Amino acid sequence: MHLIAPDPIAFTLGPIEVRWYGVMIALATLLAAGIGYRRSEKYGIKGDDLLDILLIAIPAAVIGLRLYYVAFHWDSYAGDLSAILNIREGGLAIHGGLIFAFLSAWLVCRHKRINILDGLDLAVPCIALGQAIGRWGNFFNEEAHGCETDLPVSVLIDGVNYHATFLYESLWCLMLFFLLSFIAKKRRFSGQIFCLYLMLYSAERFCVESLRTDSLMIGPFKQAMVLSACLIIAGAILYAVLSRKQNQRL
């Protein structure tokens, strides 16, 4: 089965073209925020406090998505700084968005005296669901695909079949949403769900990134693979530390 992307323009509002990529990102954000809001009380977080966090974290994530990408393509933007603001032309990096979102959420949680680990445990299943939906924006833009392949399922672009890496990640993140949501019902300690997300998402991203042809680079290495490997180790260490602290309390 070869996946063929339709017109990337979903609809127009006068002179403004609304792209499917933006529609998918908006849908992902709204659905993830809505589920997080419904679950917030179970984590000891008031709904109003969660909204305050989202009002800061979502814009911060957008900024991080762009700045992270620009930082690795600085030569392309150094001569025209205004181009940095033109995100309609593409150029977003999920790791940058996650880093900025987590940091901004931590600042708000600290101000409101909310346990950041509880906040992260609440957030990451919803983030995984958002990623599962948002990755389809790459499909509509015919981007973020892998190398050529002869697998039965692929994305067809200009007559060539490529690894549908957006689909691989979308399915994995959807599974991750359900898995983390199930484990969260019986979580043993604050931060457990966040640590599992770090390890499981990073493991998938490490594997899928090896197939992609548009990776951001650190010298000869793909930066997403380097960062994913570091996050797997960091998640495992944090999991062990938090688990040990919980066992000491029992």
Image (cartoon, helix red, strand yellow):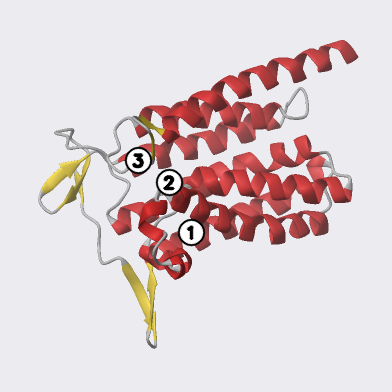
Q: Amino acid at mark 2?
A: Phe
> From the image, which quarter does the C terminus lie in?
top right
- For the point 46% across and 45% down, the residue is 132
Q: Is residue 58 above or below residue 188?
A: below
Residues at marks 1 and 3 touching, judged by CB atoms closer than 8 Å: no
Q: Secondary structure at mark 1?
A: helix
Observer-side mark, 1 or 3, equals 3
Q: Quadrant of the N terminus?
A: top left
Q: Residues within 10 Å of mark 2 (few under 14, many from 20)?
A: some
Q: Amino acid at mark 1?
A: Ile
Residue 250 visible, this angle: no
For numbered disc 2, what is the local secondary structure? helix
Viewer can see residue 35: yes
Q: Check the image and name the residue furthest to the bottom.
A: 14
SS assignment at label 3? loop
Residue 158 in picture, x, y percent from top left: 13, 54
Tag 1: Cα neighbours inside 10 Å, few (<14), some, or many (≥20)?
some
Q: Quadrant of residue 21?
A: bottom left
Q: Separation of disc 1 and disc 3 at Cα?
A: 21 Å
Q: Residue at x 55, y 38 (%)?
A: 177
Residue pointed to by mark 1 = 25
Mark nearest the camera among 2 and 1 is 2
**Can you identify the residue that label 2 sits on?**
72
Task: Give the side of residue 3 with respect to residue 172, left or right.
Answer: left
**Residue that label 3 marks:** 215
Q: Which mark is residue 111?
A: none
Which percent across, then down, holds residue 83?
Answer: 42, 67
N-terminal-most mark, 3 or 2 = 2
